[in-house]
Image (cartoon, helix red, strand yellow):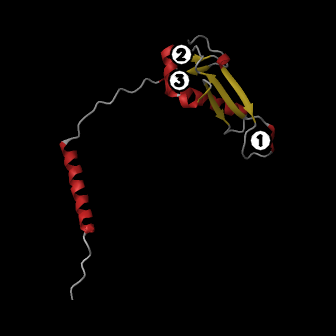
Amino acid sequence: MAGTLNPGDLRLGPRWVIPAAELRWRFSRSSGPGGQHVNSTDSRVELLFDLGATAVFSAPLRQRALAALESRLVEGCLVIAASEHRSQWQNRVAAQRRLVELLQEALKPPPPPRRATRPTRGSVQRRLQAKRQRSAVKQQRSGRPQLPED
């Protein structure tokens, strides 16, 4: 879906571009220290991306991303908040960066399944030797203290 890139579009690597029309922005006052500046500017940014309804990804990729980001979705939308900078513009850039990183991680194919292997003979012997040693230590503790004979 990578055609011509508009100024508000968001590039997700070489294959995907999220059009600016699919990104929604909300601005609010940021919390924390900052004095008069933080009380008078809407520098906190929320970036909303409707992952369930986007046409950027194919159906299987969209399902993979939805499954990976399931705990972060609010009514099917991915919401990313940024308020660490004093500037609204810097917070917008930070939110876009986070969205790109989240989606790139969510769209990665799953790792190959682990092949079960048996422990080596040496590791089994070391484990059993450590168990015997630990058992001996505990056996020594369990005896009743003997009174010294005069």
Query: Which of the pair 43/54 is nearer the observer?
Result: 54
Say which of marks 2 and 3 sits in front: 3
Q: Amino acid at mark 3?
A: Leu
The residue at the point 58 percent across, 17 percent down is: 17
Q: Say above or below: 99 vs 138.
A: above
Location of residue 53 by image quarter: top right
Mark 2 nearby-residue class (10 Å; few <14, some 14–19, many ≥20): some
> Percent x, y for residue 140?
24, 67
The residue at the point 26 percent across, 67 percent down is: 142
Q: Which residue is mark 2?
A: 57
Q: Across the whole image, how many numbered discs are drawn on residues?
A: 3
Q: Is residue 4 left or right of residue 119?
A: right
Q: Amino acid at mark 1?
A: Val
Q: Which mark is residue 38?
A: 1
Q: Which residue is mark 3?
A: 66
Of callouts 2 and 3, the N-terminal one:
2
> Percent x, y for residue 100?
57, 26
Q: Say above or below: 142 vs 29.
A: below
Q: Amino acid at mark 2?
A: Phe
Secondary element at tag 3: helix
